[in-house]
Amino acid sequence: MSKVGFIGLGIMGKPMAINLLKGKVSLLVCDLNKDAVDEVAAAGATPATYAEIAAQCNVIFLILPNGDISKEVLFGENGLASGMGSGAIVCDMSSVTPVESQECYNRLSKLGVGFVDAPVSGGEPGAINGTLAFMAGGDQKDFEALTPYFDIMGSSAVLIGGSGSGSVTKLANQIIVNNTIAIVSEAFVLAAKAGADPLKVYNAIRGGLAGSAVLDAKIPMIVERNFVPGGKISINHKDIKNVVNTAHSLDVPIPYSAQLYEILQTLKIHGHMNDDHGGIVQYFEGLAGVQVKKAED
C-alpha cells in the first residue's frame, strides 16, 4: 500500500486512523486539534498539511463534522483538489447529504479524481474495535481500490450504487437507530413510572420481537445513567437534520423523524449535545418526571 491521507481525527477518526497504522498503512494525518494529531503521530503517523497530503497520497480519507467542512477541505483555498493528481481517490466517511456527495463526485471527476461517499455505522466502539460497517456510493473501481482499507477499519463494506447512495443509506440507518432509541426510551419511561424494574423488563423482552441491537446497546447504559458518548447527540442531531432536509427536497413525508428532530432540538437547548444518543431518554424522563435507572438493592 502506498501513502494514505487521513483528515479528521475526532471521536471516530482517531481510532480509525490508529487501526490503519496497526494494519501497516503509511499514513499522513491532519486535524485542527493538535493534541489528536500528536497522539496519532505517536502511533506512527506523519503530520501533514492539505497540500502535502494531496501531493503525496493517492488515497485520502475524510471524516469531518459536516458537508460544508468536507467541501472546504476539498475545494477551499489550498484545498486538496488544487494539488491532487489524476487517478487519486477521495473517500468521504463523513455523514453528509446525498446532494453534497454528488457535488463532490462531479467536481472531482472533472479533475480525474475518484470520489466515494462511505459513511459508517458502529459508533466509537466499532471505530476502536475495527468493526465498522461502511455504506459506499461511487464507482466500482474506486470502491475496490478502497476495500483493503475498509477491511482494516471495519467488518463489512457494501457498494450500494452510484455517488450519493452511501449517504442515502446512512440517512436511512440514522432514521432507524435514532427513532428506535426514542421508542425504547418512551417504553422504559412508562415501565419506570409504573414501578417496574427496568432491567427485569429488559431481560423479559429482549429475546422476543421487541429485542434489537439498539435495546441491547442502550438499556444497560441508561439504567447505569452512563451517557458517556459512543455516538454524541450532537452528531445525530446533525444527521437527523440532514434526513429532514433531504426528505423535504424529495417530497417524502417523514412525520416520525420530524418529531425526533424536535426532540433532539429540545435536548440541545437543555445542554445534552455531548451525551451519548442513549441520552435521548432524558427527554421522555423530563416529560414524565421519572428516571429509568437500576433498582436499588
Image: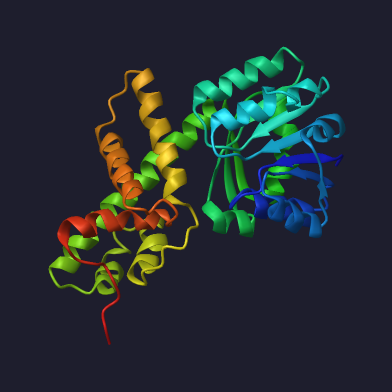
Q: Which residue: 39% across, 34% down?
A: 241
Q: Is residue 44 above or below residue 59?
A: below
> In the picture, residue 296 is in which quadrant?
bottom left
- From where the camera sits, is residue 106 visible? yes
Q: Which residue: 53% across, 51% down?
A: 122
Number of marks in picture? 0
Q: Which residue: 86% across, 30% down?
A: 55
Pick whichever, 40 or 212, lies toward us.
40
Question: Where residue 252 appears, x then y in whole percent?
Answer: 32, 22
Question: Where residue 247 appears, x then y in whole percent?
Answer: 36, 25
Q: Quadrant of the C terminus?
A: bottom left
Q: Is residue 287 toward the left or the right of residue 225 in the image?
A: left
Q: Quadrant of the N terminus?
A: top right
Q: Which residue: 82% across, 19% down?
A: 86
The single residue placed furthest to the left in the displayed view is 194
Q: Is residue 37 above or below residue 245?
A: below
> In the picture, residue 213 is in which quadrant?
bottom left
Pick whichever, 199 or 185, lies toward us.
185
The single residue placed furthest to the top in the displayed view is 110
